[in-house]
Amino acid sequence: MAERFDAIVIGAGQAGPALCARLDKEGLMTAVMERKLLGGTCLNVGCIPTKTLVASARAIHVARRGAEYGFAAGDIRVDMRAVKGRKDAVVKQSSDGLTNWIGGMKNVTLVRGHARFTGPRTVSVGSRMLQADKVFINVGARALVPDIPGVRDVPYLTNTTMMEVDFVPEHLVIVGGSYVGLELAQMYRRFGSKVTVVERGPRLIAREDDDVSDEIRAILEREGIEVRTGAECMTLSKKGDRIVVGLECKDGAPESRKAKRARAASACSWARCR
Amino acid sequence: MTRVSRAREAGETQGFMKVLVDAHSKELLGAALLGLNADEIVHSLLDVMYAKKPYTTIQRAVHIHPTVTELIPTLLGNLRPLA
């Protein structure tokens, strides 16, 4: 026997709770389903944590430029565990706020678990069956892992798993030179990693105008980030404890960049724009 | 951004700003802002677009000095035809 609601919202990402608040205000009995984390990508592994990390990276960058501003901060040492700790605390603050917000909606019930449609207006979560005239799908996005030869043979990170990194990799190779990839590139360069950005297209951030792409590339290169564009036939393989990214660029001979693994994690990140 | 006094003062002169407007309707079609605090400054243009007003609405606006945003009216006062 299905439990009856006026509305079902599948997914408690950033749009879900706002929609629930509206439904709650209208007095509609609402069930919101979430299988993992309240707040979804934005709050947990997207906008909020990345901008928190960017703030740390920028502070480090400015400290390193101390001499330009008339001070010496000495040897800048980055404590990545503390950087991640700060990020986790900011995320938790938002997450707690969201939990309280949803908890305070008197017509809204949070149902934990994976939602599945069992009919046009019926959704199951575990052993529960819920029914409503209005069903809203708000299921968000996942990182895309491109089908590069060798991708299954090497450990890699995505923009999501990057948020769990609590050390500074010796060398980070980022596959994908658009918004997310470049943000991670600049951030980790400032944290102290050697960073190489590998992009299939002829230029970075193809969505932007040529002059913007060029200037961004120049800014990143001035910070010591290595950029390889036109990398059309990438391959991935392992060599000892290193991951090798093979590049067969349009012009010039095939070349490879070696990324030394730091601890267990790899040095690759797949990133798509948000 | 080397023309922006606040960017020079901050020691952050990398990047540039550009806008594209329709010569006839004077509507803002788009902009690219790359540089210090550009993610905030861009809203001075976005709001004009949302209001569906011509760029001339803020061309003589007196933005606070010294800020990066103060160069937006100057930028709008120096438009050139494309090619």
Image (cartoon, coloured by chain):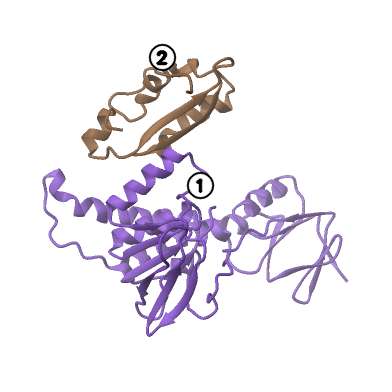
Q: Which amino acid does label 1 sit on?
A: Ala
Residue A235 percent coordinates (x, y): 49, 72
Q: Label 2 belongs to which residue? A: B60
Query: How far apart in space, not on screen, are marks 2 and 1 (Cα)?
Result: 34 Å
Give above or below for A46 relative to A166: above
Q: Label 1 belongs to which residue? A: A206
Which numbered mark, 2 or 1, is in the foreground of this view? 1
Tell me which residue sits at (45%, 18%) in the image: B58
Residue A143 percent coordinates (x, y): 57, 64
- Local packing at callout 1 (Cα closer than 10 Å; few below 14, some 14-19, many 20+) is some
User: Can residue A99 be seen?
Assistant: no
Give above or below for A127 relative to B34: below
The answer for which chain carries disc 1 is A
Closest to the observer, A46 or B1: B1
Question: Color used for chain A?
Answer: purple
Closest to the observer, A253 or A177: A253
Q: Is residue B61 left or right of residue B3?
A: right
Q: What residue type is labelled 2?
A: Arg
The answer for which chain carries disc 2 is B
Which chain does the brown colour mark? B
Tell me which residue sits at (53%, 44%) in the image: A207
Total marks in image = 2
Q: What element carries label 1?
A: loop
Closest to the observer, A214 or B19: A214
